Image (tube, grey):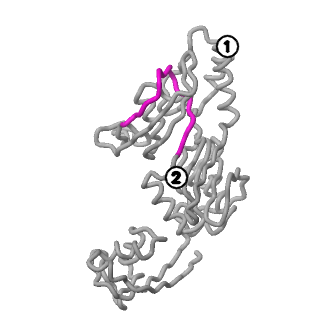
Amino acid sequence: MTEERNQYSARIPDELAGQRLDRALARMFPDYSRSRLKAWLLDGSVLIDGASRRPRDPVQGGETVVLTVTADVAVRAEAEAMTLDVVFEDADLLVVNKPAGLVVHPGAGNVSGTLMNGLLAHASQLESLPRAGIVHRLDKDTSGLLLVAKSLPAHTALVRELAERAISRQYLAICNGVLTGGGTIDAPIERHPVDRTRMAVRDNGRPAVTHFTVIERFRAHTFVNVVLETGRTHQIRVHFAHRRHPLVGDPVYGGRLTLPAGATESLRNALRAFRRQALHAARLDLKHPATGQDLGFEVPPPGDFEALLQILREDIA
């Protein structure tokens, strides 16, 4: 395990007098999240005038803070050489275009060959960051843009942006059924009460909001643009299945195969052969975590997605 220690010293400004210590520290050290600072307070990594203090203790103003940051290796995955489709990279940020079929994080049955393994080989400093700097998830069989921080300050800033809904994520999807227009799906999501590998719309779930617009309509399917307002596990897949328009090919929430009347053999074969959810993370918009510059990235859907669209278009030609 590698370890890096950095020490910072600062005086608590008088204008923060009366605030909780953890809140005051979050104002003074914006590169670190309040939860991270609270953990360091509890383990003795933060001293106030040479002594440990509780996160809830009020500050007087004028105290000297000494913060000792110890960055341990945060992940146990092994680095593995992997060809990554890098859309953007600088000292703070990495944006990759993930192919369908690639698992993002190691887990039971997937200890190697994941995107995290490849990222650690691409940039070894990621081993000191939570989840190797990966800011948000994509399901194994969802393709498209994924955001990675390359430093702890960048990770803190991007996680905050995501929590404050300042990062826009747009997806392309093909769903079963013909939608008459766009709309918003506002339905809370929680673990399925019986099958814990699935998610479900439940009254006691966490708030989940999905916006969508129609791009193209076919005889029994619809091509849609989807914008996430929240980011729950399987959110788009669960929401469209809840509206009885599950995504084409979804092995978990898809239900029965939908075929238009008189479908050609090529369309039948294409729909039967598409065995992953027809979902692609097409666009990301965010502010650069270090410079504040507005950034936008966009990638087209992969070949199997485009081929399915083409066959659906030929069906109505």
Estimate how packed mark 1 is, as few (under 14), some (14 to 19) or many (20 or more) residues with alpha carbons within 10 Å. Answer: few
- 290 relative to 235, above or below: below
**CB-based contact (under 8 Å), mark 1 and mark 2:** no
* Residue type, mark 2 in image: His
- Residue that label 2 marks: 136
Q: Is residue 100 left or right of residue 138?
A: right
- Residue that label 1 marks: 317
Residue shown at 44%/82% (left/top)? 67
Toward which corner of the image does residue 132 lie, by quadrant? bottom right
Q: Main secondary structure of the magenta part?
A: strand
Quarter of the figure that contains the C terminus = top right
What are the residue bounds of the magenta stretch?
169-186
Residue shown at 63%/69% (left/top)? 125
Quarter of the figure that contains the N terminus = bottom right
Residue 248 in the image, given as x and y percentages of width and height: 55, 27
Q: Choose the circle earlier in sequence order: 1 or 2.
A: 2
Residue 272 in the image, given as x and y percentages of width and height: 61, 23
- 279 relative to 36, above or below: above
Q: Separation of disc 1 and disc 2 at Cα?
A: 39 Å
Q: Secondary structure at mark 2?
A: loop
Q: Is residue 52 left or right of residue 120?
A: left
- 200 relative to 294, above or below: above
Q: Is residue 173 magenta?
A: yes
